[in-house]
Amino acid sequence: MGFKIYLASPRGFCAGVDRAIDIVERALKIFGPPIYVRHAIVHNRYVVEELKGKGAIFVEDVNEIPEGSIVIFSAHGVSPKVREDAKRRNLKIIDATCPLVHKVHREVKRFAEEGYNIILIGHKGHVEVEGTMGEAPDKVILVETKEDALKVQVPNPDKVALTTQTTLSVDDTREIVEVLKSRFPNIVLPKSEDICYATQNRQDAVKKLAELCDLILVIGSKESSNSNRLREVAERKGKKSFLIEDERGIDPSWFDGVRAVGITSGASTPEKLVRRVVQYLLNNGGISVEEIEGIEEKVKFALPAEVLG
């Protein structure tokens, strides 16, 4: 007996990712290759490989870039030190940082200037977290877990502000926030509009899928924070869930006894990979495809002046 296929909505590219990829493609057309990009423009191997094929060169350190070249900062943002290093090498900077990440950077800077210590909820080593912490390294304290929140110490408990990695949702941080609020009653919380709309919308869509499906496949790279969170949301709902890059990551044994399969994709995953997975499933037991109704995203971010020519 076959299984039904349900597609989450929304899924895939968010406005920040769309903008970042568009910036690289436009820069390649306007200025010609090579265009250097500091870090993977977004966390998806297919996107990166496609842009490499068009002449983009990805580096982890701006000091690897020849002086006077063009550099694009990835959607995840960079620290002031990276900006200074780029300027010292006389690099022409085009900034593809997601505007929501920029907003967090500005707030961290402002709070630090006002004498606050800032608690940042995020994942150690994630490139976005490194960039945010770089705005005020001596003032920002990273908290990853509820246990961290119970132990964290600050010089002045009455002057604490909170911010989060943008790829975490309200659900991801709820428990940690509750602990911090109980320990620091005067903590300044992030404004609701600072929470990444796309992260929350995609997680809400997965919860809808979980009501209908026995198995949920999340299409995204293992480096993608928001893709990993989507898989965890499905698991918290008691559903078997796997993170795959494309149809080649599928194990046919997953479908034994399954009547409905849900599919979603991370915010940096191209839709063509979703289509490939759907086709694979239709060729291997899938009997129908239905898209779940979800929030329609109308957010668009303006492009930087350098690529509007």
Image (cartoon, grey):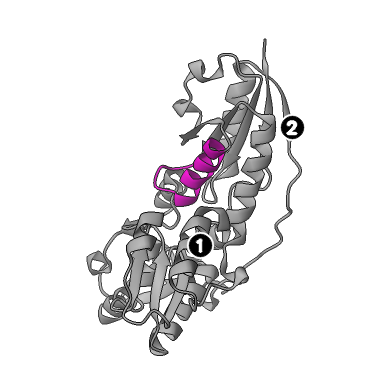
Relative to 4, does residue 6 appear above or below in the rendering? below
Q: Amino acid at mark 2?
A: Glu
Depth order, front residue of 248/307: 248
Q: Quadrant of the N terminus?
A: top right
In percent of the image, x 61 and y 49: which residue is there? 202
Give how far across and how far down residue 78 sits, in percent. Answer: 37, 70
In percent of the image, x 66 and y 45: which residue is there? 205
> Horizontal placement of 83 versus 254: left or right?
left
Callout 2 secondary element: strand
Q: Is residue 145 visible?
A: no
Q: Main secondary structure of the magenta part?
A: helix
Span of residues in magenta: 220-236
Depth order, front residue of 1/111: 111
Depth order, front residue of 225/153: 153
Give how far across and how far down residue 133 sits, in percent. Answer: 35, 71
> Horizontal placement of 108 versus 170: left or right?
left
Q: Quadrant of the C terminus?
A: bottom right
Give how far across and how far down residue 38 sits, in percent. Answer: 35, 63
Residue hosting label 2 = 290
Residue 265 belongs to the span the image colors magenta: no
Binning the other alpha carbons within 10 Å of mark 1 as few (below 14), some (14 to 19) or many (20 upward) gives: few
Give how far across and how far down residue 285 sits, in percent. Answer: 63, 15
Relative to 306, does residue 217 appear above or below in the rendering? above
In percent of the image, x 58 and y 37: which residue is there? 237
Residue hosting label 1 = 178
Task: For the residues labelled 2 and 1, say whether their Cβ atoms are less than 8 Å apart.
Answer: no
Whole-number angstrom distance, CA of label 2 to CA of label 1: 38 Å
In percent of the image, x 68 and y 34: which residue is there? 211
Q: Amino acid at mark 1?
A: Glu
> Horizontal placement of 177 versus 112: left or right?
right
